[in-house]
Image (cartoon, grey):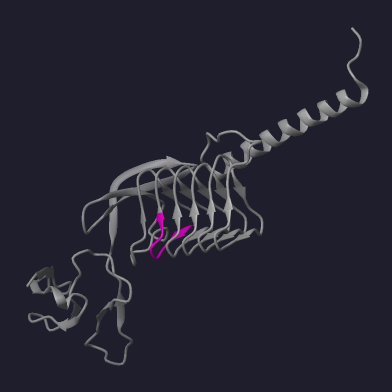
């Protein structure tokens, strides 16, 4: 039988229990406080019980629910789009993660995680089992949850919501009030989804052939790049129309 070794969060007494008891709530044999037998990984598995800390001094007070921390900051910082971001490290296995502005950006519950050079800041939230990886960025009031994935050089910002099994990849960006769900996928170079767009089911949006590779990563730079390229396309189209209408002037 496998045993789990853990520490009472109330009195710091080292304890151990059979593996099958992981997630059960017991009274600490030393301090008698109500505690939860920790899982091997600090992240709280779905549908598991949370630890309830009771205040013995006031039995009429509502019990305090404490969510165990999944990660902490490494101390490394970086500046991005005028914001100071901090790198995270997962407590259960020491894996170094990506960058966030504060702990509101990544939930301590579930298996959600930010990998590699990915960055999440502003009021953006990553929760449940969602993952942001590679060099993707999520900002503004965007929300990524469920089993959604944001990867590659993708950018999600504004009030966009990505959830269920949706995937945002490549050099694509999702903004505005867009909602991407189901098994929908947005990918390719400079693929734009914004406004009140709703994608669901198995819908796919891939690269726009009239636009080139994006080299910027912040939402501001993305919008600027698209505006410049759109102006170039408009100018070219106007010149072509004038040539077709009036022909070339004789030299």
Q: Position of residue 6 (x, y in %)?
A: 13, 69
Q: Nearer the viewer, residue 165 or 85?
A: 165
Q: Position of residue 171 (x, y in %)?
A: 52, 41
Q: Is residue 96 above or below residue 216?
A: below
Identify the residue shown where x is 34% and y is 66%.
110
Q: Is residue 128 magenta?
A: yes
Q: Is residue 104 left or right of residue 142?
A: left
Q: Which residues are magenta?
A: 124-131
Identify the residue shown where x is 82% and y is 30%.
238
Is the magenta region chiefly helix, strand or loop?
Answer: loop
Q: Is residue 228 above or below residue 148?
A: above
Identify the residue shown where x is 91% and y is 10%.
250
Identify the residue shown where x is 41% and y is 61%.
104
Q: Nearer the viewer, residue 166 or 216?
A: 166
Q: Is residue 107 left or right of residue 6?
A: right
**Residue 21 appears in which quarter of the rendering?**
bottom left
Residue at the bottom extreme of this rendering: 60
Q: Position of residue 2 (x, y in %)?
A: 9, 70
Q: Quadrant of the N terminus?
A: bottom left
Q: Nearer the viewer, residue 198 or 84?
A: 198
Q: Position of residue 168 (x, y in %)?
A: 50, 51
Q: Is residue 138 magenta?
A: no
Q: Is residue 79 above or below residue 232?
A: below
Q: Quadrant of the C terminus?
A: top right
Q: Is residue 228 left or right of residue 1?
A: right
Q: Is residue 45 above or below residue 148?
A: below
Residue at the front extreme of this rendering: 202
């Amino acid at each position: 039988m496998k045993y789990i070794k853990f520490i009472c969060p109330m009195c710091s007494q080292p304890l151990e229990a059979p593996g099958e008891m992981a997630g059960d709530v017991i009274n600490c044999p030393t301090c008698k406080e109500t505690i939860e037998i920790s899982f091997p990984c600090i992240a709280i598995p779905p549908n598991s019980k949370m630890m309830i800390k009771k205040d013995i001094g006031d039995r009429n007070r509502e019990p305090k629910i404490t969510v165990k921390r999944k990660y902490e900051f490494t101390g490394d910082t970086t500046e991005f789009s005028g914001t100071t971001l901090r790198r995270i490290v997962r407590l259960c296995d020491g894996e170094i993660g990506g960058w966030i502005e504060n702990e509101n950006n990544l939930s301590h519950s579930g298996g959600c995680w930010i990998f590699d050079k990915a960055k999440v800041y502003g009021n953006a939230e990553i929760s449940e089992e969602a993952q942001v990886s590679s060099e993707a960025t999520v900002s503004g009031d965007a929300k990524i949850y469920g089993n959604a994935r944001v990867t590659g050089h993708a950018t999600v910002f504004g009030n966009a919501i990505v959830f269920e099994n949706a995937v945002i990849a490549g050099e694509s960006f999702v903004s505005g009030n867009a909602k991407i769900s189901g098994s929908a996928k947005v990918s390719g170079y400079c693929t734009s989804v914004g406004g009140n767009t709703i994608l669901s089911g198995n819908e796919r949006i891939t690269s726009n052939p009239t636009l080139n590779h994006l080299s910027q990563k912040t939402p501001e730079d993305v919008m600027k790049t698209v505006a410049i390229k759109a102006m170039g396309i408009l100018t070219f189209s106007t010149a072509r129309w004038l040539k077709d209408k009036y022909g070339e002037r004789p030299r």
